[in-house]
Amino acid sequence: QVQLVESGGGLVQAGGSLRLACAASERIFATKTMAWYRHSPGKQRELVASIPNGGSADYKDSVKGRFTISRDNAKNTVYLRMNSLKPEDTAVYYCNADPPLTYYSDTYRSWRNYWGQGTQVTVSS
């Protein structure tokens, strides 16, 4: 059973900080590179940061120096610390593996990406 449960979002003023957390299934966490994605209205979902199991993190250029991804393998949890938030960071944030986990949909008769419920981050100017 796939489990991805995001938390920690909220409303903050520009310049503020938030820390997101994502609890994942052990079988996902143990072997996968984990990542945070975000989805804003009118835009495609985008990869924000990723961290392999035992390697160096990677970041989207626009968040470098402001966001920090980390993982706690003992807790099967991945975090995203977000500092100096900007209004353009407003989005629903999701965690997933990189590349995202997939499942076969009988409804659509195709492979689909699995996503949790996400957590809303809103940055006011």
Image (spheres, rainbow, N blue to C red):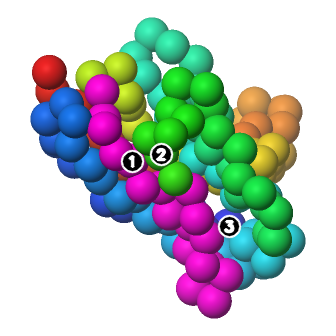
Q: Position of residue 103 (x, y in %)?
A: 79, 49
Count neighbours of disc 2 (C-alpha within 10 A) and say few if under 14, some if 14 to 19, many if 20 or more: many
Count neighbours of disc 3 (C-alpha within 10 A) and say few if under 14, some if 14 to 19, many if 20 or more: some
Could you say whether the residue bearing mark 2 is in a helix, strand or loop? strand
Return the disc, 1 or 3, that comes first in the chain's sequence.
Answer: 3
Give how far apart the Cα atoms at labels 1 and 3 are. Answer: 26 Å
Work out which residue is located at the far bottom of the displayed protein and give it: 74
Q: Which residues are magenta?
A: 69-86
- Point out the frontmost of discs 3 and 2: 2
Residue 20 to residue 25: above or below: above
Q: Which mark is residue 67?
A: 2
Q: Which mark is residue 2?
A: 3
Q: Are marks 2 and 1 in contact (CB under 8 Å)?
A: yes
Asked whether, in this view, residue 54 is left or right of residue 8, the answer is right
Could you say whether the residue bearing mark 1 is in a helix, strand or loop? strand
Q: Position of residue 25 (x, y in %)?
A: 66, 75
Which residue occupies the foreground of this view, 19 or 118? Answer: 19
Whether residue 13 appears in this view of the structure is: yes
Give how far apart the Cα atoms at labels 2 and 1 are. Answer: 4 Å
The residue located at (50%, 40%) in the rendering is 65
